[in-house]
Amino acid sequence: MTFDATSPQFRRDPYPTYANLRKNEPVPFISESSMGEMEAFLVTRYDDVITVLKDTRFSNDMRKVGEKIETPWWMPKVLSSFQSSMLLVDDPDHRRLRDLVHKAFTPKMLQDMNVRINRTSDELLDAMAGKSSVDLIHDYALPIPLTVISDMMGVPHKDRQKFHKWMGTFLDISSGTKLQMAGKLINMVQMYRFFKGLIKLRRKNPGDDLVTALIKAEQDGDRLNEDEMVAMIFILLLAGHETTVNLIGNGTLALLENRDQMQKLQAHPEMLDTAVEELLRFTNPVEQPAPRYTLEDVELSGQKIPKGSRVLVGIASANRDESAFPNADQLDIERSPNKHVAFGLGIHYCLGAPLARMEGKIALQKLLARYPNMKLAVPSDQVQWRTSMAVRGLKALPVQLG
């Protein structure tokens, strides 16, 4: 099976391709040229995605299938440190890391999030007042989660804008010219050094922040080592702002393209909870989670997947599967039940899901209330999407505020 998953056409609307795959080739073998990654099997049907996410025959740890992690001399150490992330290990290592992070999320910290999100949203909307048009990603969707997670992590204000650039570098690491790749690697070195410096700073000067809490977190005499700490900060920053940017941006675009649903939500704000769940399903802020590796031969939808294979989990395809969601390609803010897999499933269910939901609800509610006549400033087919296959997000969202 070959198709260019990084092409502007596919990035703009991958769902017809996914629908064709679900019908005719539900578990295709994808060549490197198609995805810009290593060869892999792509799982596209809802039931098969559920199986991969929950079945212990599918591992997050590539080392379990004999893959050696050999970091070339030119590769930033942040990539080897990333292998210590709880995203890329199984239980019991995953449970150990997850429990330590849970201890760092204190009740006070969780309570403070709501206040931060509301305050930041209001300030950004105030700053937009008087402007006829804005880029909703740059002016609203990005600053909200970036401010919240940076406050939580104790990141100095002068360094915060660097994070989005660094996160984008990591997600798009497989694409670009050799010169662009070199620039991305330099950015990743800077990111790694910054994380190390932040840990050192908080060890010396503890604060009321998540990095300090991670340093202090202990479970049965256990603590995070240095590489685990770097990986954890990286994951929390990524999960704490990247997916939320896409939920707000993609969600706003979906509502603007479905005015009847937007008007219904404006008239019935009590539908906000189900609306956000539907926007998560419909727009897929995360397109594919971390890949899995088969620990034994497995068969899915008639396709035999040999032991040691790399498996891509198509949650964006699963969330549009007609067998699981009636009228799957229609946005329905009242959809119930809505068993989407936007945050994954099983032991690797997204740790930041409650925060992402909270930010999405507050941001969308305030935006629609403040600017009820907002509309796209460019035709829908001119909106540009990012090339990453890991997340599905917009480069920019020009809107007229009305």
Image (cartoon, rainbow, N blue to C red):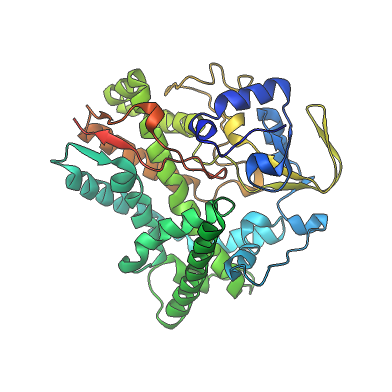
* In the image, residue 57 above or below residue 93: above
Depth order, front residue of 49/11 = 11
Quadrant of res 88: bottom right
Quadrant of image for the N terminus? top right
Is residue 151 something that shows in the picture? Answer: no
Looking at this view, name the residue that lies furthest to the bottom.
Answer: 204
Question: Which residue is located at x 72 percent, y 21 percent?
Answer: 24
Total numbered badges shown on the rendered structure = 0
Residue 102 placement (x, y as % from top left): 54, 59
Residue 123 placement (x, y as % from top left): 21, 50
In the rendered view, does 119 fall on the left or right side of 36?
left
* In the image, residue 295 above or below residue 274: below
Residue 396 placement (x, y as % from top left): 36, 41
Looking at this view, name the residue that lies furthest to the left.
Answer: 130
Question: Which residue is located at x 53 percent, y 16 percent?
Answer: 327
Is residue 163 something that shows in the picture? Answer: yes
* In the image, residue 317 above or below residue 112: above
Quadrant of image for the C terminus? top left
Residue 294 placement (x, y as % from top left): 79, 46
Depth order, front residue of 48/206 = 48
Question: Which residue is located at x 43 percent, y 22 percent?
Answer: 334
Depth order, front residue of 345/310 = 310
